[in-house]
Image (cartoon, rainbow, N blue to C red):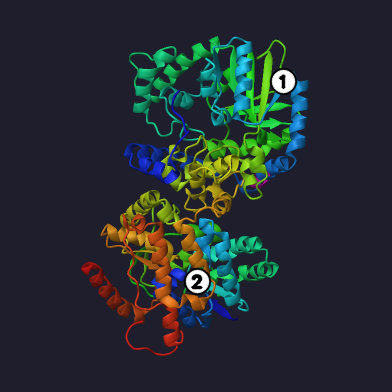
């Protein structure tokens, strides 16, 4: 796979390309609209939804507050269950661990459960460099992989593709990756799914090593949990002899019961289903059943940095349901690629700067601004992450990170505005205010406004001047006001 | 009750008619409203762009201008939200404990117009007359940051002569978002275009909202498309009576003539 997010342009530029693609915009508007409506319907069925959200947020929040203790406990229980626990500070360490395990078993290929975290660390590409082929087994993930494309949604990575495009990808690419697509392939969803099934089955039965992520990890019992819709994940988790699970350290919860609100919140928020079709849990090794060698890689990769951020740490509560993507008006128009990361949409806009830090990469620094702050994301987030508040805080961090450098025109304009707004005498009415507005507009680019929007006419008199002249309308005036 | 009008910087500079409408309306309802001359801007443009230090003077001026009033009324959901939710962040960052205390004291007294009318004055029928077909766009900040709910709708439904038509996709953001409108102009315009399309679908003569900043954006798109649909602030509808509609019609006709000449 050659497609990569590395070196993507900053959001406004990447968005411009996406906006110009009318097929993409149609696909996205249609898909997000459908999921959005489904979610709203099934959420409305739950009377205590708000209480559930509070409970879900609390579970994750408590776990994060005591993260170290829970992780140590998780390592103990997993080890006691026969799993081998590895710790990885960053992507390179995690990738090296997985590659070494595959090599130990002389595996030239691995099958994968759909996993955000292995995408985050670029595992497939890293394995490819070691001569190991990693096959995605999730249907949408397979479409993305075969199409040499990038995922554009957390849950529906091929959301930007329609079925005619998918048929095209299967016809031209499946053969090189294994079992070819049948000659009479149509673009019926069932037919496409059947072709993928045949293609994947061969791989499941052949592969010695399976790779997964986890939605949750329970510290007290040493249990990992994956929820999915297709069952392909379960095949990956049970068929290969060796299983490697890469798990972000924020996935841990303390006790088994705490899964209750989370497992109720997740399917309704993500796919608009009452219950997800498959929930798989595994705890180490069971002799004679399933993988006989289990490895768990606990990954940091910026998470402790995020944890140290007072406002932003709440982003680690995220259970990757993607509800915020589906309601986001910006995401709906630009799609996921514009965010330049495997984490797109509102959560991606805050998570990337948190994991990577701001002030050294224009692309990352552009993400907190990729929002109109409409608040729709916070409204749907099952674990109540106040994304708009984090976005504003991140913007402040971006600005602060650049305070000592050469000031941008925007910074100069803001400084000017700060001075004038500090005292009304400095404002002195309409001329001054309009001056600030125009100055600001010129500095950030008036053409950006007037490209497709007219400006209102400026009135002859400001409100303040009117109030003074007429004593707040008490003095009768001549002519219109 | 001592009531102050926070007119907002956009209204002061571009839409004095909105401020005047609030004054007329409240006076008609028996409320004397004061306009503290010391006010400038709520600081939101700076806060939302990440310039928190630069917002400190504005927040300081804000609390000084409005201290001592029982209620502060503003014809802007966004600026009300800024005072209620963002000033505390700015104050905390400034390290000035007195400022923090002043903000905490003042924030709960700041009301968006529809909240003030319905919750504080307890009225939904403000005695207005407005013989037009309008559609209502709930702005994001009034909808989600403040939770004004159906208050604006209830006020509009009580206006005599007015026909209120539902706006498809009403709760979708119009794409203004302050500096978002220029920093991400292409996305902003795409969102504005969809909003404009929905507004035109309703066949309304006007689109009404409680925030002139969003209306500047929406109106800017509608005007560029020569749609003929005009933006109007909620306050101006509520202030309108039989006596004022004729006068307004004359002004509007004048404005249209000017617009056409441009
Ligand atoms: S931020 Fe919230 S809504 Fe978005 S993916 Fe995460 S849990 Fe879901």
Q: Nearer the viewer, residue A438 or B198?
A: A438
Who comes first in sequence, dot 2 or dot 1? 1
Identify the residue at image location x=43%, y=53%.
B183
Q: Where does label 1 land, which residue?
A: A84
Q: Quadrant of residue A52?
A: top right
Q: Is residue A445 above or below residue A146?
A: below
Q: Is residue A54 magenta?
A: yes
Give above or below for A52 relative to B3. above
Q: Residue A28: tell me if it is visible.
A: yes
The residue that mark 2 highlights is A420
Q: Is residue A42 above or below residue B30?
A: above
For the N terminus of chain A, the image quarter is top left
* Residue A69 drawn at (x, y percent): 77, 36
Q: Nearer the viewer, residue A202 or A176?
A: A176
Quadrant of image for the C terminus of chain A:
bottom left
Q: The magenta stretch spans which residues? A: A52-56
- Whether residue A445 is in magenta: the answer is no
Magenta portion: prevailing SS class: helix
Q: Residues within 10 Å of mark 2 (few under 14, many from 20)?
A: many
Q: Position of residue B129 (x, y in %)?
A: 38, 75
Residue B44: image location, x then y, percent: 52, 63
- Residues A200 and B213: in front is B213
Q: Among all residues in the image, which is located at the extreme bottom?
A: A475
């Amino acid at each position: 796979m050659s497609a990569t997010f590395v070196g993507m342009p900053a959001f406004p530029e990447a968005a411009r390309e996406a906006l110009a693609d009318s097929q993409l915009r149609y696909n996205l508007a249609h898909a997000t609209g459908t999921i959005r409506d489904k979610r709203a319907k099934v959420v409305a069925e739950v009377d205590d939804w708000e209480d559930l959200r509070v409970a879900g947020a609390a579970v994750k929040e408590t776990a994060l507050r005591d993260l170290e203790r829970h992780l140590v406990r998780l390592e103990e229980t997993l080890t006691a269950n026969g799993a081998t626990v590895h710790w990885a500070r960053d992507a390179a360490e995690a990738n090296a661990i997985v590659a070494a395990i595959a090599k130990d078993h002389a595996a030239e290929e691995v099958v994968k459960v759909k996993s955000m975290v292995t995408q985050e660390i670029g595992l497939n590409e890293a394995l490819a460099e070691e001569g190991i082929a990693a096959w995605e087994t999730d249907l949408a993930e397979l479409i993305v992989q075969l199409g040499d494309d990038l995922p554009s949604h957390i849950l529906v990575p091929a959301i930007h593709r329609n079925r005619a495009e998918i048929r095209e990808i299967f016809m031209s690419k499946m053969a090189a990756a294994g079992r070819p697509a049948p000659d009479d392939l149509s673009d019926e969803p069932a037919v496409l799914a059947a072709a993928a099934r045949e293609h994947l089955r061969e791989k499941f039965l052949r592969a010695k090593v399976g790779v997964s992520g986890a939605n949750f990890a329970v510290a007290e019992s040493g249990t990992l949990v994956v929820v999915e819709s297709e069952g392909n994940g379960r095949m990956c988790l049970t068929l290969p002899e060796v299983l490697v699970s890469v798990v972000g350290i924020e996935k841990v919860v303390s006790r088994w019961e705490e899964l209750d609100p989370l497992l109720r919140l997740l399917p309704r928020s993500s796919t608009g289903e009452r219950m997800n079709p498959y929930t798989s849990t595994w705890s180490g090794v069971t002799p004679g059943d399933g993988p006989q060698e289990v490895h768990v890689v606990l990954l940091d990769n910026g998470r402790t940095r995020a944890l140290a951020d007072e406002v932003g740490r709440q982003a680690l509560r995220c259970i990757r349901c993607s509800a915020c993507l589906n309601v986001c008006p910006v995401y709906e128009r630009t799609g996921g690629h514009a965010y330049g990361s495997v984490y797109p949409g509102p959560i991606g806009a805050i998570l990337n700067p948190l994991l990577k830090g701001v002030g050294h990469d224009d692309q990352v620094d552009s993400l907190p601004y990729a929002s109109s702050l409409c608040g729709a994301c916070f409204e749907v987030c099952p674990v109540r992450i106040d994304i708009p508040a984090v976005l504003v805080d991140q913007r402040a961090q971006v600005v602060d990170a650049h305070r000592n450098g050469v000031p941008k025109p925007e910074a100069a304009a803001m400084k000017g505005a700060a001075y004038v707004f500090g005292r009304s005498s400095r404002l002195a009415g309409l001329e001054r205010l309009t001056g600030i507005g125009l100055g600001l507009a010129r500095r950030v680019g008036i053409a950006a406004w007037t490209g497709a929007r007219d400006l209102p006419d400026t009135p002859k008199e400001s409100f303040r001047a009117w109030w003074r002249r007429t004593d707040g309308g008490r003095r009768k005036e001549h002519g219109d006001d | 009750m001592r009531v102050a009008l926070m007119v907002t910087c956009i209204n002061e500079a571009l839409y004095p008619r909105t401020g005047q409408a609030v004054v007329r309306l409240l006076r008609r309802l028996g409320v004397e409203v004061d306009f503290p001359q010391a006010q400038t801007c709520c600081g939101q443009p700076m806060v939302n762009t990440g310039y928190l230090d630069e917002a400190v003077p504005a927040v300081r001026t804000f609390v000084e201008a409005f201290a001592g009033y029982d209620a502060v009324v503003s014809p802007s959901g966004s600026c009300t939200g800024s005072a209620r939710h963002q000033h505390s962040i700015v104050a905390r960052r400034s390290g000035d404990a007195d400022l923090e205390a002043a903000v905490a004291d003042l924030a709960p007294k700041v009301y968006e117009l529809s909240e003030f009318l319905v919750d504080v004055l307890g009225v939904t029928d403000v005695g207005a007359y407005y013989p037009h077909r309008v559609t209502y766009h709930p702005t994001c900040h009034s909808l989600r940051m403040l939770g004004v709910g159906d208050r604006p709708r209830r006020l509009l439904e009580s206006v005599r002569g007015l026909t209120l038509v539902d706006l498809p996709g009403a709760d979708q953001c119009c794409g203004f978002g302050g500096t978002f409108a220029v920093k991400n102009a292409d996305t902003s315009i795409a969102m504005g275009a969809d909003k404009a399309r929905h507004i035109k679908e309703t066949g309304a003569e006007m689109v009404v909202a409680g925030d002139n900043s969003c209306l500047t954006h929406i109106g800017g798109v509608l005007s560029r498309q020569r749609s003929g649909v005009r933006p109007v602030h909620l306050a101006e509808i509520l202030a309108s009576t039989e006596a004022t509609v004729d006068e307004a019609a004359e002004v509007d006709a004048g404005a249209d003539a000017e617009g056409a000449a441009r």
